[in-house]
Structure formats: structure tokens, C-alpha cells
């Protein structure tokens, strides 16, 4: 009986982390089976996990949060889902609000560890042949690109990029940073996914050197406006960088973005269908840019929702002294210039972080006080935790 009580207490104490892991695992299952909506086991799985998330929140947290805030979140989530039919936003809300008492820092840490377990499981299962790992020949390169059963060779690095951001925020150890760099080098060799690799090196380099001066008012203003600045940069890529050499270097992103600008309705409520316009080797594509992908693919209302959310996040993060958190969010935005999946549940830990702080009873939590570090010098990374 004592053993059963200990086990049940463990599951009760760590129910949020367990459910977050199970929710993230759904994304991996979806990638394994392809169209999960046609897979009855996947539908049953996500329905069960969603029910457990709702039950956990009702029994542990519903009486501890402001109901008006919950109603507001449900309303906004419903509008986004109705317009985009995208289940990612629902998963972000369900998983993150369960951490309202534990806080943003624990959410980010659990997010990164859960995602790492999922990625390592995919690599192991594909290595032993338990799941199909499609290899794609790299044209004129003489080697193969591995997807580890995740459907595309860029997907493993996409997950790994988020893991790196979560680990950088959660751990101070220099050894963690060294291991993250080693892992990114190995992964870029196997997948040739350059965007995530360069963004990881960029973020870690800035974190170590403390090159950006966040004491400058100009820098802080630019930081707050970064989500809006990135919209302008997204339009500059197809309009100012659409030359043959640059287009080839950026994997034809400028030319594909230019097709969006020329052929899509700009301000639709439900967005445009990429598959009718973006065709490459007979296959439909999405545009590899988060900002234009959401604007053209999901419509103006969903676009304004995400830009507003990230602008609010950057406004409040600017007020704390956590250099690493700021750099990671900058890297997150830069990654969005070349990839479309920032809104995906496995990418979107910043939205969850904002929701947790918004619902917290501690007004200072909205300013991410729990994430602040006292160290002001880059030397902290060489200290062993």
C-alpha cells in the first residue's frame, strides 16, 4: 500500500510534466503515421491526453486562477481555431495552463527535456529499423539526408533548435552549451539542415560573448519591436534578395515568397491555399517563413493574434535582466524568417510561457521575475552548477 501511495503521489506531483510529455509525444506519433486524422489510435490518444489535461487543470488549478482570464483565453483560442482549423493552439493552451502554479521556468525545462526524449526515441527507433527512416539523396552533394522517421530531413533540427533554447534558458552550465554545440554539429552532418544549425551557433555565441548591450535604450526599443521588424524583413527577403545566387543559397525561399506576394490575397480572414500556387517537382509546398506563412496561409486575424502575442511577450521580457532569455527569443524570431513552424506546438514554448505568467496570481510573474539571473557577466557559463 505504501508503494502504491508513493507512486500515486509521484504522478500527482508531476502530473503536469507527464501530461506535457504525452502531449509532445503526440506530435511525434503524428509524424510517424502521416495523416493522424485518418489514424483511429492517434485520434483516441490525443482525445485521452486532452481529457486528462482538462481534468488536471479543473481539479488542481481552476479555483486558483482568474476565471475572466480563462474565458478570455478560451475565446481567443476558439477564434484562432475556427479561422485556421489548427489544433496547435489548443495543445499549447491545454499543456501550459497546467503549469500556472509551477511557473514558466519549470514549464520551459520540462518542455525541453520532453522534446529531447522524443527526439532521442525517434533516432533510436529509426536506427534499429523499428520505424521507417526515409533517406533523401542530396543533389550533387554525394551523401544522404536522414529524417529519423520524422517525415523530412529538416524536422529533427527543428526540434533540436527548440531543445537548445529551452536548455540554454534552464541551465547555466558550460558543459550543457558544449554538448548542445556537439549535438548540433552531428545533426547538421546527418540532416544538412543549415538554418537550425546556424541559429543555434548564433544564439550560443551571443550568450557567451554578451555582445548585445541591453542597457541601451535603442537596443531595448528594437527588442520590443522585433516581431514587427521581422515582418518588414520577411517582405525584404523576396523583394530585395531575389537574385539567382542568393535564391539558390537560401534554398529558393526568396522566389517562393515572391510567388506568395504576387499571387495571394493579402488580407483574407481564413487565408490562402498554398497547394494551389506553390508547386515544386509536382509537390505542394508551404512558404518557409513564419510571418508570411501565417499572413497568407491562415489569414489576417490569426496573423494579428500571433504578432500581438509575441509583441506583448517581448515587451515584458525586456523589463527583466535575463540576457539568455532575451537572446533565445531573438534566435526564435530569426529562425522564423526561414522556417514556417513557430506556431507548431513543439516549437511554441514562448506562447505557453506567456499564458502561464498571465494566469499566475503573482503579478510580478508576468514580468518573468522567476526567470531572472543575478549574474551580469558572461563568466557565469563556466561555473559548474
Image (cartoon, rainbow, N blue to C red):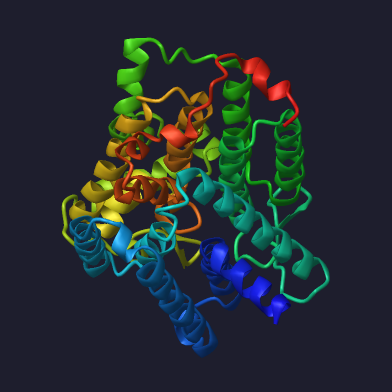
- Extreme residue in the right direction: 128
Q: In the figure, is residue 375 to the left or right of 264?
A: right
Q: Quadrant of residue 133?
A: bottom right
Q: Measuring 59% from the left and 44% from the top, which residue is drawn there?
A: 161
Q: In the figure, is residue 312 to the left or right of 214?
A: left
Let me know if residue 183 appears in the view: yes
Let me know if residue 259 appears in the view: no
In the rendered image, residue 73, in percent from the top left (x then y), is placed at 24, 58
Q: Measuring 54% from the left and 87% from the top, which residue is drawn there?
A: 41
Residue closer to the observer: 22 or 135: 22
Q: Please identify the quadrant where the N terminus is shown.
A: bottom right
Residue closer to the observer: 289 or 351: 351
In the rendered image, residue 286, in percent from the top left (x then y), is placed at 41, 57
- Extreme residue in the top direction: 216
Q: In the figure, is residue 322 to the left or right of 63?
A: right
Residue 106 drawn above or below residue 238: below
- Extreme residue in the bottom direction: 40
Q: Measuring 77% from the left and 44% from the top, which residue is drawn there?
A: 186
In the rendered image, residue 355, in percent from the top left (x then y), is placed at 34, 50
Residue 292 drawn above or below residue 84: above
Residue closer to the observer: 1 or 367: 1
In the rendered image, residue 46, in percent from the top left (x then y), is placed at 47, 78
Residue closer to the observer: 366 or 28: 366
Q: Measuring 28% from the left and 44% from the top, which residue is drawn there?
A: 309
Q: Please identify the quadrant where the C terminus is shown.
A: top right
Total labels drawn: 0
Q: In the figure, is residue 140 to the left or right of 247?
A: right
Residue 145 drawn above or below residue 223: below
Amino acid at each position: 500500500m505504501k508503494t502504491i501511495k508513493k507512486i500515486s503521489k509521484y504522478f500527482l506531483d508531476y502530473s503536469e510534466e507527464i501530461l506535457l510529455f504525452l502531449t509532445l509525444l503526440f506530435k511525434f506519433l503524428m509524424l510517424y503515421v502521416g495523416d493522424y486524422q485518418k489514424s483511429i489510435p492517434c485520434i483516441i490518444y490525443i482525445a485521452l491526453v486532452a481529457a486528462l489535461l482538462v481534468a488536471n487543470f479543473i481539479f488542481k488549478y481552476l479555483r486558483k486562477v482568474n476565471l475572466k482570464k480563462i474565458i478570455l483565453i478560451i475565446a481567443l483560442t476558439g477564434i484562432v481555431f475556427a479561422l485556421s482549423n489548427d489544433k496547435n493552439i489548443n495543445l499549447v493552451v491545454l499543456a501550459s495552463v497546467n503549469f500556472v502554479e509551477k511557473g514558466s521556468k519549470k514549464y520551459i525545462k520540462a518542455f525541453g527535456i520532453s522534446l529531447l526524449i522524443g527526439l532521442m526515441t525517434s533516432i533510436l527507433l529509426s536506427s534499429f529499423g523499428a520505424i521507417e527512416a526515409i533517406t533523401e539523396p542530396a543533389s550533387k552533394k554525394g551523401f544522404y539526408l536522414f529524417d529519423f522517421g520524422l517525415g523530412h530531413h529538416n524536422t529533427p533540427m527543428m526540434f533540436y533548435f527548440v531543445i537548445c533554447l529551452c536548455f540554454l534558458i534552464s541551465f547555466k552550465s558550460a558543459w550543457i552549451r558544449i554538448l548542445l554545440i556537439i549535438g548540433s554539429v552531428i545533426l547538421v552532418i546527418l540532416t544538412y539542415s543549415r538554418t537550425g544549425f546556424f541559429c543555434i551557433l548564433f544564439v550560443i555565441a551571443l550568450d557567451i560573448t554578451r555582445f548585445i548591450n541591453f542597457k541601451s535604450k535603442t537596443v531595448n526599443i528594437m527588442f520590443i519591436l522585433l516581431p514587427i521588424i521581422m515582418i518588414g524583413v520577411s517582405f525584404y527577403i523576396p523583394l530585395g534578395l531575389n537574385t539567382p545566387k542568393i535564391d539558390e543559397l537560401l534554398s529558393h525561399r526568396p522566389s517562393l515568397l515572391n510567388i506568395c506576394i504576387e499571387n495571394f490575397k493579402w488580407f483574407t480572414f481564413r487565408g490562402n491555399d498554398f497547394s494551389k500556387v506553390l508547386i515544386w517537382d509536382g509537390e505542394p509546398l508551404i512558404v518557409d517563413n513564419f510571418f508570411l506563412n501565417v499572413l497568407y496561409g491562415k489569414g489576417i486575424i490569426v496573423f494579428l493574434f500571433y504578432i500581438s502575442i509575441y509583441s506583448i511577450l517581448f515587451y515584458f521580457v525586456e523589463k527583466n535582466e535575463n540576457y539568455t532569455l532575451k537572446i533565445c527569443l531573438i534566435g526564435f524570431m530569426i529562425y522564423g524568417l526561414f522556417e514556417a513552424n513557430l506556431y507548431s506546438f513543439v516549437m511554441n514554448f514562448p506562447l505557453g510561457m506567456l499564458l502561464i505568467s498571465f494566469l499566475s496570481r503573482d503579478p510580478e510573474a508576468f514580468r518573468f521575475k522567476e526567470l531572472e539571473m543575478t549574474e551580469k557577466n558572461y563568466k557565469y557559463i563556466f561555473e559548474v552548477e
